[in-house]
Each structure stands twice: as C-alpha cells, then as structure tokens.
Image: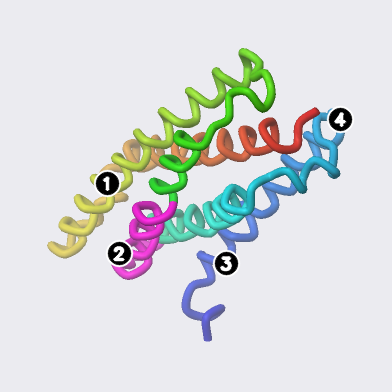
C-alpha cells in the first residue's frame, strides 16, 4: 500500500541513494576515505546524514506532487519540517558546541566547507519553512504554487540539493578522510 500511495517518494529515495552511492564511489576512487576511520564518526552524525536523505526525498516528493498533480502533501511537508526543526537544528547546535579544535588540525578546505555548509544549511532551513508555508496557503486556495513559481521552485531544489551534498562531502572529509 505504501508503494502505491507515494511512488514518487520511493523514486526520489532511489535517486538520492544512487547519488550517495556514486559520491561514495568517487571519494573511494580518489582514495580520500579509509573505511577503518568510519568507526570514529559519531552515531548522531551518521544517523543525521542518512535521515537527511529521507527528508530530502520527502521534500522533493511534496514539490513534485504539487507541481504535477496540484496536490500539496501537507502531512509529508509537516513531517519534513518537524524533522528539520527537531533534529537538524539540534544537530547543528550540538556540532557547534562539541567541536574539538584540539583533536586534529582542520585544513583551510575543511574550514571553508564547514562555513559554506553551515551557512547554506541555515539559509535553506529558513527558506524551506517560508517556502512550504506559502505553498500550503496557496494550495489551500487552489493555486498550483510550485508550477506558477517554477523558477523559484527550481532554484530552491538546486540549492537544497547543494546543501545536502555539501553536508555529505563534509561528513566524508571530517570523519572518513585521511
């Protein structure tokens, strides 16, 4: 029943999983990761990374269904927003408070990536809240918000994907890098 109700959600999960696997293969091929270092990654970070793929799939599904079928999936949007508020924001605060500067010397690339990812993630979180709130109101009035604002929607999706991929890259560099 779940597969019949939301095939676009599962397609989105498969696409994002495939992108993650591709990124893993590229990183491994470039000999950046060492699997033994995986044990040093905090569980909270690993769970957040994996869960973010599902949240992103939910967001892509809400937008796709809204754009194609003029149906705003309120519950799925609310679930994604709730996760972002409860877990990702708390995770960002946790990482900011528990970053151990003495553990290892951070390279300029790592510092730049952390600044880029952290800033973009916060901007995209605020954008997500506003974007979904406006869409919710417009769809309630029968207006296909994502179709009418196609350029804004596409820009949001590109920046959201960039935010997620920068987080994945940061995870690999921080925990699995040499």
Q: Quadrant of the C terminus?
A: top right
Q: Earlier in the sequence, mark 1 or mark 2?
A: 2
**Does the magenta portion include 85?**
yes
Residue 105 place in picture, x, y as percent: 67, 18
Q: Earlier in the sequence, mark 2 or mark 3?
A: 3
Judged from the image, the secondary structure of the residue bearing numbered disc 1 is: helix
Residue 7 place in picture, x, y as percent: 53, 71
| Vertical order, 164 against 103 (above or below) | below
The image quarter containing residue 71 is bottom left
Residue linked to disc 3: 10
Look at discs 4 and 2 and give the one toward the viewer. Answer: 4
Between 31 and 132, the residue placed more toward the observer is 31
Residue at horizontal 63 percent and vertical 53 percent from the top: 43
Q: CA distance from mark 1 to mark 3?
A: 23 Å
Crowding at dot 1, Cα within 10 Å, few <14 / some 14-19 / many 20+, comes out as some
**Does the magenta portion include 70?**
yes
Residue linked to disc 4: 31
Question: Bounds of the magenta span?
Answer: 65-87
């Amino acid at each position: 029943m779940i597969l019949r109700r939301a095939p676009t959600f599962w397609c989105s999960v498969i696409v994002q999983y495939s992108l993650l696997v591709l990124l893993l293969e590229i990183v491994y091929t470039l000999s950046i990761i060492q699997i033994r270092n995986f044990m040093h990654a905090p569980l909270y970070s690993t769970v957040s990374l994996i869960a973010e793929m599902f949240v992103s799939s939910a967001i892509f599904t809400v937008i796709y269904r809204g754009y194609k079928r003029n149906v705003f999936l309120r519950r799925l949007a609310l679930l994604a927003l709730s996760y972002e508020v409860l877990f990702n924001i708390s995770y960002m605060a946790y990482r900011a408070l528990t970053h151990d500067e003495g553990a290892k010397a951070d390279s300029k690339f790592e510092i730049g990536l952390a600044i880029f990812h952290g800033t973009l993630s916060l901007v995209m979180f605020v954008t997500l809240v506003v974007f979904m709130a406006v869409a919710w109101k417009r769809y309630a009035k029968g207006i296909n918000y994502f179709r009418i604002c196609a350029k804004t929607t596409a820009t949001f999706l590109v920046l959201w994907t960039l935010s997620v991929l920068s987080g994945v890259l940061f995870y690999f560099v921080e925990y699995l890098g040499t």
